[in-house]
């Protein structure tokens, strides 16, 4: 049993409940803050102030929007499957909160005389818990699209399922290198391994790059927000949702952003430990841990906002090609390189030197592969049927067909069709005559 597990095992029940409540409140506050932060940053990018009316600096705007959603009319489609329709947003929200339970946000502290670690629980397979929770979250999206009884939510749900399947593989492969180098699946052990050497963002930079791209795809954020593309699918999988059910989907999206950012901080940026110049001192102990952790967390969240404000949405084929043709093969090659470096630990060349050089070459290879022009598909030639075929041909080369014959009225209430000549005139090329004694209309 590790020291972290020993401390967590001695936690009384009231302390466990207190940790759960604090984590829940932290995620709720971070959601409200991120909505305000995103609107302010995007506003500054577009040279406008953003929300600045409700509360100081507009900080209460997100809370006001949440209260407004609570009082909105709850509309349910007539063709919806009622039970599944209600259950879908709950699944998305619960899985988003559950993934944060294994992430350490600080070291050993004393809370009302009880020595504990700032972490709800530390499992030997903590990394797999996060991956499992992120995979289960897509069930809420798929069920919401199917239960809505509408084509656009269903298309968004199918997109989300394909997106998670594609990028969950790349995300898992990027974590394999971290597990190989740290020797553990426990999040606390991974943080401790980085405190004894360089952060993994330097030693395993290709894994860090793949993880960052995959976590944007996992959370359906721009430029990978294809399941809710407004220009293509109206509102995506939550088109038919309103009031608090829509708010739960909105909450799950931002909680997932915070969770994957916290996971990236834990795996690659040393977790709650202070940066290199300050590591190991008094600023790397006690309640300083949450300060460093939140600072790194906000840096990742800013990248999410930055991507949304600067990059256009990718096409679906480009998005899938990036995942299956670049990220997955590159991760597999990188895992082989990391395994070889770990096997050569007793040689004259250190594993860190091998990984830095190999990672640099792999990143160059991935960038070149992504930027190479793709081969254009050959245009298919269609056979043109001749005039003697079974059915008539449509007009070709913008040939406009002759106008239909004009109808003229002869006599009172009696109409006849004038025969059309080759030049479009009537009566075989002669203009139509009006008979004496009969009016025309």
Image: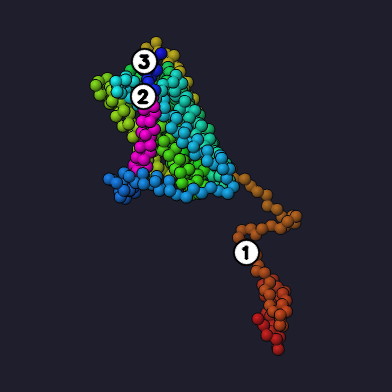
Which residue does the numbered mark 2 point to in the structure image?
A: 15
Pick the front one: 196 or 198: 196
Q: Is residue 155 magenta?
A: no
| 1 vs 2, front mark | 2
Pick the front one: 30 or 168: 30
| 1 vs 3, front mark | 3
Pick the front one: 201 or 284: 284
**Marks 1,2: beta carbons within 8 A:** no
198, above or below 238, in the image? above
Identify the residue at horizontal 34%, vertical 20% (top origin).
Answer: 116
Q: Is residue 38 magenta?
A: yes
Q: Which residues are magenta?
A: 14-40
Residue 60 numbered mark, or none: none
Judge the density around disc 1: few (<14), some (14-19), many (≥20) Cα neighbours within 10 Å: few
Instruction: Report the side of 378 relative to 412 (left or right).
Output: left
Of labels 2 and 3, earlier in sequence is 3
Residue 3 numbered mark, or none: 3
Give residue 337's position: percent from left, percent from top.
Answer: 45, 21
Which residue does the numbered mark 1 point to in the structure image?
A: 400
Q: Secondary structure at mark 2?
A: helix
Q: Calculate the distance from the C-alpha at mark 1 to the C-alpha at mark 2.
A: 82 Å
Residue 205, quarter of the rendered image: top left
Q: Calculate the distance from the C-alpha at mark 2 to the C-alpha at mark 3.
A: 18 Å
Of labels 1 and 2, earlier in sequence is 2
Identify the residue at horizontal 39%, vertical 40% (top origin).
Answer: 307
Give residue 291's position: percent from left, percent from top.
Answer: 29, 29
The number of numbered badges drawn on the structure is 3
Which quarter of the rendering shows the C terminus? bottom right
Q: Calculate the distance from the C-alpha at mark 1 to the C-alpha at mark 3.
A: 85 Å
Is the stretch drawn in magenta largely helix, strand or loop? helix
Of labels 1 and 3, earlier in sequence is 3
């Amino acid at each position: 049993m590790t020291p972290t597990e020993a401390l967590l095992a001695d936690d009384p029940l009231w302390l466990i409940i207190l940790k759960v409540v604090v984590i829940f409140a932290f995620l709720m506050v971070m959601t409200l803050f991120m909505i305000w932060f995103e609107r302010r940053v995007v506003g500054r990018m577009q040279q406008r102030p953003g929300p600045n009316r409700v509360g100081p600096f507009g900080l209460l705007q997100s809370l006001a929007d949440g209260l407004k959603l609570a009082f909105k009319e709850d509309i349910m489609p007539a063709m919806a499957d009622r039970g599944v329709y209600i259950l879908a947003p709950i699944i998305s929200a619960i899985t988003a909160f559950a993934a944060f339970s294994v992430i350490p946000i600080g070291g050993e502290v004393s809370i009302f005389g009880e020595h504990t670690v700032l972490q709800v629980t530390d499992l030997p397979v903590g990394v797999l818990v996060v991956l499992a929770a992120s995979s289960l979250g897509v069930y809420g999206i798929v069920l919401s699209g199917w239960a809505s009884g509408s084509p656009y939510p269903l298309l968004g749900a199918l997109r989300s399922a394909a997106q998670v399947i594609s990028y969950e593989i790349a995300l898992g492969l990027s974590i394999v290198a971290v597990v190989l180098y740290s020797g553990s699946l426990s999040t606390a052990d991974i943080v401790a391994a980085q405190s004894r050497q360089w952060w993994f963002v330097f030693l395993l930079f290709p894994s860090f790059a793949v993880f960052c791209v995959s976590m944007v795809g996992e959370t359906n954020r721009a430029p990978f927000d294809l399941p809710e593309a407004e220009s293509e699918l109206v509102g995506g999988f939550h088109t038919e949702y309103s009031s608090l059910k829509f708010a739960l989907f909105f909450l799950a999206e931002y909680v997932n952003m915070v969770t994957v950012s916290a996971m990236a901080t834990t795996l690659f940026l040393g977790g709650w430990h202070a940066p290199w110049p300050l590591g190991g001192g008094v600023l790397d102990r006690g309640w300083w841990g949450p300060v460093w952790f939140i600072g790194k967390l906000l840096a990742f969240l800013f990248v999410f906002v930055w991507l949304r404000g600067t990059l256009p949405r990718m096409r679906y084929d480009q998005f899938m090609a990036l995942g299956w043709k670049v990220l997955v093969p590159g991760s597999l090659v990188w895992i082989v390189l990391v395994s070889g470096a770990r096997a050569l630990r007793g040689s004259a060349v250190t594993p860190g030197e091998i990984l830095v050089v190999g990672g640099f070459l792999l990143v160059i290879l991935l960038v070149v592969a992504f930027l190479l022009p793709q081969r254009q598909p050959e245009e298919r030639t269609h056979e043109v049927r001749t005039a003697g075929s079974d059915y008539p041909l449509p007009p070709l080369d913008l040939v406009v067909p002759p106008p239909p014959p004009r109808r003229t009225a002869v006599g009172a209430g009696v109409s006849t069709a004038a025969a059309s000549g080759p030049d479009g005139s009537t009566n075989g090329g002669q203009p139509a005559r009006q008979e004496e004694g009969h009016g025309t209309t």
